[in-house]
Each structure stands twice: as structure tokens, then as C-alpha cells.
């Protein structure tokens, strides 16, 4: 199947961030004969516009960048670029949208125009945000955008989504506690950064657990480093963790709460406590009205019971215009971002068929 050929060709040429010359060259080679209008609104991006003479358009997005991972799949079409790999399925996403493009080129009428987005920097700096700011949606009168991601936790070929919360807002949390080291025999002369770090951790856990169970959120710390030797008061503690939530008010309340805990621990212990969080991506939040419209047009997909605590920069599109995100099940497969990630290529036809049905019926 041509869709599998696309996936394998793209899998061999993984590129990072916004530097995607081989990937863009392949996409242009496939798209140029199809009669669509091509443009690059931002560096590393390629957009294909199919004009059916309608007043409005809908958009389909694929991410195009890969990861800085040395591939370990043993596939005959493995990466030709050392230290780079399509370990998150973006090669599959592009292949499905290319297959959609070839189908669109054969259509004589649709209820809307169609804009296809091949987006850079999903894994790094959030290329979706830059595309939103480029004016490409306004130029083509796009009223909504759709996206899809391979998902190993679903049966092969199953397409699923849910209303409202789907993928979390997230940020990294780094807490640095600076005290004063002293010999344990003279502990009173020091300021114990280990004890202060433990106090911070316990209060942070209590803060997260104070929220009701129906509020989806996560605040966990995966690493704690402190001290140098067993018989000296620790002079420095480092706590590294992750904060994830879906509602902005929950996210910012937890983030502000961590800062307040740091200030309280500093006052009580005499240590200096610094809490740093990065920006991260907003939550992927599927609007209920758009979700219901897609259901009503007869396109079939399953409903997920719970959201997932992983982030995706598709959320920037949803901040700009209505957007709906889906998962395409891989069945039993290695984890996303693993150096041995691969999947049953038969699912590609399922994802592409879903895109075509949506483009025709919505």
C-alpha cells in the first residue's frame, strides 16, 4: 500500500525540531502533483490547501519532527540518520495525512475546503503555537482543526477520544534548597537542606491530595538529591518533579501553592528555597459542541473513560480555534519515545479511512 510506503520512506529520514529539509522535500514531492496550493507559513512547516470553492475550510494536522534517539528496532527501513528516530509515530501521522491528500485530489466536491498542516517542533518548542500566530487559519477561513496520535494503550486500529479533558497541561518542577553544611556533631551550626527538602515534599504531596478525586491532576517528584556524606548536615537539596492538570485554575493554584510552600519552608528552616517551573503546553481539551457535531455526522470512534497525563502541543490550536484530537490504537507495542518503538502498519489504513470519512461527512 502506498500509505505504508510513505511511512517507511519518512521513517528513514527523521529530523529534529524545525530543521526538516529531507522531510519537507519528500512531502513536497508527493503533494506537488495533486493540484493543491503549498505554502510554508513558518520555518519547517508545509501547508497544503485544497480549494473546493467553499467559503470555509477544515484543517487536518500532522506533526513532522522526530526525536534525538538512536533507533534500536532492527527494521529494514530503520533511520538512516544516527541519533535520530521517529519514535513517537510522527512518520505514521504524516503518512495518513498524505494518503488523505491523495484522496482529496480525486474529489470533485466537498462541503468545505481542506487545509493540511505538516507541523515542525511538536517535540520541542511548540510549533503549533507559531502556526496559529502565522495567520494561516485566517487566510484560509478555517473553522476547525483535527489531529490524531498513535496510542499503544488502545487495541490496534481503534480510534478513540473523549469530551473535555483528553491530554494534560504539564510543566517541569525544580526545587532547589540551599542550606549550610556542618559536621553532624555540630548540627546546630548548620541549616539542614535535607530536612527542609523533606518538609517541602510532604507539604507538596498534601497540597495535591487536598483536591477532590474527580479533579484530574498529578503532582509527583521522581528525583531527590541531597548532601555529600553521612556525617555532615546537608547543604543543598534538589527535588525534580512534574505538575500536570487540565483546568488552568487547578494548574495555577497548584503551581502557586508550591511557591507558597517554598516560602514557608524557607522562613521556618532558614534555608533558601527556590521553586522553578517551565511553561509547558496547555491541556488538550476537546470542546463538547464540536465533539457532538462529529458524532452526529456518523463518523465512528470510541469514547475514552479517562484522560491521559501526557501533553501535546495540539492544545495551542484549540486555544486559537475549535479543535478535536483523537488516538489511534497500536495494540501491543513498545512505549512511545522508546528506541524500539514500532507498530502494526495495518492501522495506517484505519486512521486514513477515518480522516477521509470525516472530510466527506463533516
Image (tube, helix red, strand yellow):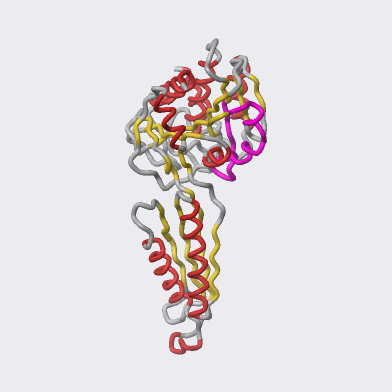
Q: Is residue 196 left or right of residue 47?
A: left
Looking at this view, name the residue that lies furthest to the front: 289
Relative to the observer, which residue lies in front, 202 or 187? Answer: 202
Decide whether residue 247 is among the magenta residues: no
Q: Name the spot of residue 205 as percent of width and height, x first.
A: 39, 64
Can you give x and y, in whole percent of width and height, for residue 356 in the image? 46, 20
Count of residue discs = 0
The answer, for residue 284, to whether it is visible in the render is: yes
User: Which residue shows up at 48% across the image and 49% down it?
Assistant: 169
Quarter occupied by residue 137: top right
User: Where, quadrant-wise, is the N terminus in this rendering?
Assistant: top left
User: In the rendered image of this protein, does residue 52 appear above or below residue 134?
Assistant: above
x, y percent for residue 133: 65, 39
Identity of the residue drawn at 49% across and 21% down = 359
Q: Residue 291 sits in which quadrant? A: top left
Position of 301 relative to 196 (above/below)? above
Range of residues picked out in magenta = 116-142
At a point 59% along the width and 18% down the height, the residue shown is 54
- Identity of the residue drawn at 39% across and 37% down: 162
Taking the image as shown, residue 198 lies to the left or right of residue 9, namely: left
**Residue 135 painted magenta:** yes
Residue nearest the observer in this picture, 160 or 53: 53
Nearer to the camera, 85 or 288: 288
Locate residue 193 relative to residue 335 in the image: left or right: right
Examine the rendered structure and indicate whether residue 219 appears above or below residue 335.
below
Whether residue 83 appears in this view of the structure is no
Residue 292 position in % (x across, y down): 41, 31
Amino acid at each position: 500500500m502506498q500509505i505504508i510506503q510513505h511511512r517507511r520512506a519518512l521513517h528513514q529520514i527523521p529530523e529534529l525540531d524545525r530543521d526538516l529539509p529531507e522531510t519537507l522535500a519528500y512531502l513536497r514531492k508527493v503533494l506537488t502533483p495533486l493540484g493543491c496550493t503549498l505554502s510554508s507559513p513558518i520555518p519547517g512547516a508545509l501547508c497544503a490547501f485544497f480549494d473546493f470553492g467553499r467559503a470555509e475550510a477544515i484543517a487536518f494536522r500532522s506533526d513532522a519532527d522526530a526525536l534525538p534517539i538512536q533507533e534500536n528496532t532492527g527494521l529494514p527501513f530503520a533511520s538512516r540518520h544516527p541519533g535520530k528516530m521517529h519514535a513517537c509515530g510522527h512518520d505514521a501521522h504524516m503518512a495518513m495525512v498524505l494518503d488523505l491528500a491523495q484522496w482529496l485530489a480525486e474529489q470533485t466536491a466537498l462541503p468545505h475546503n481542506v487545509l493540511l498542516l505538516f507541523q515542525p517542533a511538536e517535540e520541542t518548542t511548540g510549533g503549533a503555537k507559531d502556526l496559529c500566530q502565522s495567520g494561516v487559519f485566517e487566510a484560509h477561513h478555517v473553522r476547525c482543526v483535527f489531529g490524531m496520535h498513535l496510542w499503544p494503550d488502545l487495541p490496534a486500529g481503534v480510534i478513540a477520544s473523549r469530551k473535555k479533558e483528553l491530554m494534560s497541561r504539564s510543566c517541569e518542577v525544580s526545587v532547589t534548597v540551599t542550606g549550610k553544611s556542618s559536621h553532624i556533631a555540630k548540627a546546630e551550626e548548620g541549616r539542614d537542606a535535607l530536612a527542609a527538602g523533606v518538609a517541602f515534599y510532604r507539604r507538596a504531596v498534601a497540597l495535591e491530595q487536598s483536591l477532590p478525586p474527580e479533579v484530574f491532576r498529578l503532582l509527583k517528584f521522581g528525583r531527590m538529591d541531597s548532601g555529600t556524606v553521612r556525617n555532615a548536615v546537608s547543604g543543598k537539596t534538589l527535588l525534580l518533579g512534574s505538575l500536570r492538570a487540565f483546568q488552568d485554575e487547578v494548574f495555577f493554584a497548584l503551581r502557586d501553592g508550591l511557591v507558597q510552600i517554598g516560602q514557608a519552608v524557607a522562613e521556618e528552616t532558614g534555608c533558601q528555597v527556590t521553586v522553578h517551573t517551565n511553561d509547558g503546553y496547555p491541556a488538550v481539551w476537546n470542546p463538547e459542541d464540536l465533539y457532538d457535531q462529529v458524532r452526529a455526522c456518523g463518523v465512528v470512534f470510541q469514547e475514552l473513560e479517562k484522560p491521559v497525563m501526557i501533553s501535546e502541543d495540539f492544545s495551542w490550536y484549540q486555544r486559537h480555534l475549535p479543535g478535536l484530537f483523537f488516538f489511534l490504537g497500536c495494540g501491543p507495542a513498545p512505549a512511545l519515545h522508546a528506541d524500539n518503538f514500532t507498530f502494526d502498519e495495518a492501522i495506517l489504513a484505519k486512521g486514513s479511512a477515518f480522516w477521509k470519512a470525516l472530510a466527506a461527512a463533516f
